């Protein structure tokens, strides 16, 4: 099992949720109004760094990891202009 941390621009929320649905992912936790600075620039919710990010935390079974990773990578490549999308995948030792 792996934990996916999907950090993305609030502007692409719909596309992310569609991608998760297409991959058969039903369970996740989503945090809104996340601010920070990354490779796609500042998302601070201010005039200096307009916009915010969202964060999805999701446990993914090993059998689904590759498919979901490919779908998210293809989504990132599909944008005509650079959109903030970062996926971090870490192993899960145990859930309680």
Image: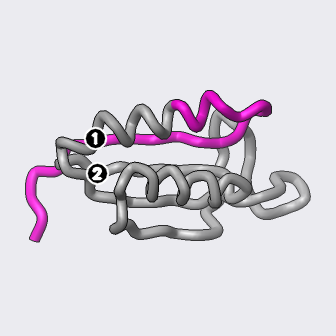
In percent of the image, x 60 and y 34: which residue is there?
76
Please report contact status of discs 1 and 2: CB closer than 8 Å, yes or no.
no
Q: Position of residue 93 (x, y in %)?
A: 10, 51
- Residue 65: give its label: 1
Q: Which residues are magenta?
A: 74-96
Drawn side of residue 4 relative to residue 74, left or right: left
Is 18 in the magenta? no
In percent of the image, x 67 and y 53: which residue is there?
12
Is 94 in the magenta? yes
Q: Position of residue 68 (x, y in %)?
A: 38, 42
- Looking at the picture, tell me which residue is in the foreground, 12 or 71: 71
In percent of the image, x 64 and y 68: which residue is there?
33
- Figure coloring: one colour
Assess disc 2: are there few (<14), some (14-19) or many (≥20) residues with their C-alpha within 10 Å of its C-alpha.
some
**CA–CA distance in space, label 1 to label 2:** 9 Å
Assess disc 1: are there few (<14), some (14-19) or many (≥20) residues with their C-alpha within 10 Å of its C-alpha.
some
**Disc number lying in front (1 or 2):** 1
Badge 2 marks a residue whose secondary structure is strand
Query: Which mark is first along the chain, 2 or 1?
Result: 2
Q: Which residue is mark 2?
A: 3
Drawn side of residue 71 relative to residue 65, left or right: right
Q: Position of residue 79 (x, y in %)?
A: 71, 34
- Residue 6: give its label: none
Question: Residue 46 occupies which quadrant of the picture?
Answer: bottom right
Looking at the picture, does residue 96 appear above or below residue 85?
Answer: below
Drawn side of residue 22 relative to residue 65, left or right: right
Q: Quadrant of the C terminus?
A: bottom left
Badge 1 marks a residue whose secondary structure is helix
Drawn side of residue 57 relative to residue 55, left or right: left
């Amino acid at each position: 099992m792996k934990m996916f941390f999907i950090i993305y621009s609030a502007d692409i929320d719909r596309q992310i949720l569609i991608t998760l649905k297409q991959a058969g992912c039903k369970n996740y936790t989503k945090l809104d109004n996340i601010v920070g600075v990354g490779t796609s620039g500042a998302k601070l919710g201010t005039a200096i760094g307009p916009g915010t990010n969202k964060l999805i935390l999701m446990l993914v079974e090993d059998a689904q990891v590759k498919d979901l990773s490919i779908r998210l990578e293809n989504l990132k490549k599909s944008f005509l202009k650079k959109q903030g999308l970062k996926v971090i995948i870490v192993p899960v030792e145990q859930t309680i």
